[in-house]
Image: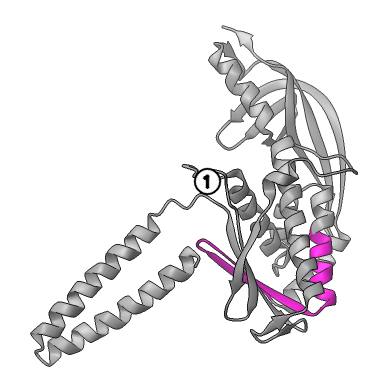
Amino acid sequence: MSRKFELEALEAELSAISELLKEAAAVNDPVGCIQFEQRRTELEAQIQALRNANITEASVRLYFKGAPVIDSRGIEAGFAGKALGDFQEIISRQFAKSELGSLGERGPVPLKDATALMVTGVALGSFGFLLDEIPDQPQMLDTVLKETLGEVMDIIDAAGSDNDVNFEGAAEEIDSRTLIALRQFFIDLDSNKATIRFVSDLRDFSLDEGAIHRARIRTEATQIEETDTEKSGILIGFLPEHRRFELQLTPGELIYGSATKESTEQYRATMVAGSRAIGVKCTAKFNERIIKPLNRPQKRVYRLLEFVEIGQKE
């Protein structure tokens, strides 16, 4: 059971116990009051512990409704396999983009084995599946796959939003190959007249037929053009925790955006070595993307891939 569902169940029981405690006090039932008070204390402790639990692995439930589903009894095998495959492909491509910065237009997706989610059960209620990351050993911090799953859910939610601006912001976080996988996911849902609900950890949202069709139109109409380029300028800002940079190319031209894991490690190594990186000239390789959304102005987005030259001795 996901943490969200466990919390909802415990909170519902807590509410019921609190009402029973009031009734016991109203009829002067001391034994009932003691029993209900003890149970309320136990539930409050369980709720607090669950809220503070360190859940570090990726986990999500996908619930389907619509034409391919018969209540909670079954789902068309072909549709289910395709939908799960589409979802996994989005995660794999987004993960690779986050780790490497950019992907080739063709060929195998790098690091794909590191993104495999396992079907660990069937979700009750409608019809759906439990997908979990099963790491080789326990993790103290959130896994990269869990972070990627959160990004993918944000992108999917924004794609179906009734606000174009939400999807424009999300589109800045994906590349052309991830867009293709996202587009196919919505085409398959829309063509089969299916709806979907996502539940992961503390997140829960659904896309109805209107949202799915809207997402399909947006992803089909959006284009992303990519090129890798090398630029030089003054590095005026770098946030390694958030992987963000700002680079002054000329006095009137500033670019900013995200940074890869490799470039972040290069920056940290420069600082550890005692060199100054901020405020000095550097040369770096960038992935430059031009995003052309439906009926909206295009945007230019940069991702810092790696530094060619960085740092100046103090």
Is residue 190 within the magenta segment? yes
Where's residue 213, x and y in %? 80, 73
Q: Which residue is at the front of the view, 54 or 22?
A: 54
Determine which quarter of the picture holds residue 257.
top right
Regarding mark 1 in the picture, which secondary structure is present there?
loop
Query: What residue is disc 1 on?
Result: 142
In the image, farthest residue toward the right? 106
For disc 1, the neighbor class at 10 Å (few under 14, some 14 to 19, many from 20) is few
Determine which quarter of the picture holds residue 43.
bottom left
Residue 172: in sight, yes or no?
A: no
Q: What stretch of residues is rendered in magenta?
A: 182-207
Residue 32: in sight, yes or no?
A: yes
Q: Is residue 291 above or below residue 80?
A: above
- Looking at the rendered structure, the kind of residue marked 1 is Asp
Where's residue 79, x and y in %? 80, 73
Is residue 33 within the magenta segment? no
Q: Is residue 167 above or below residue 249?
A: below
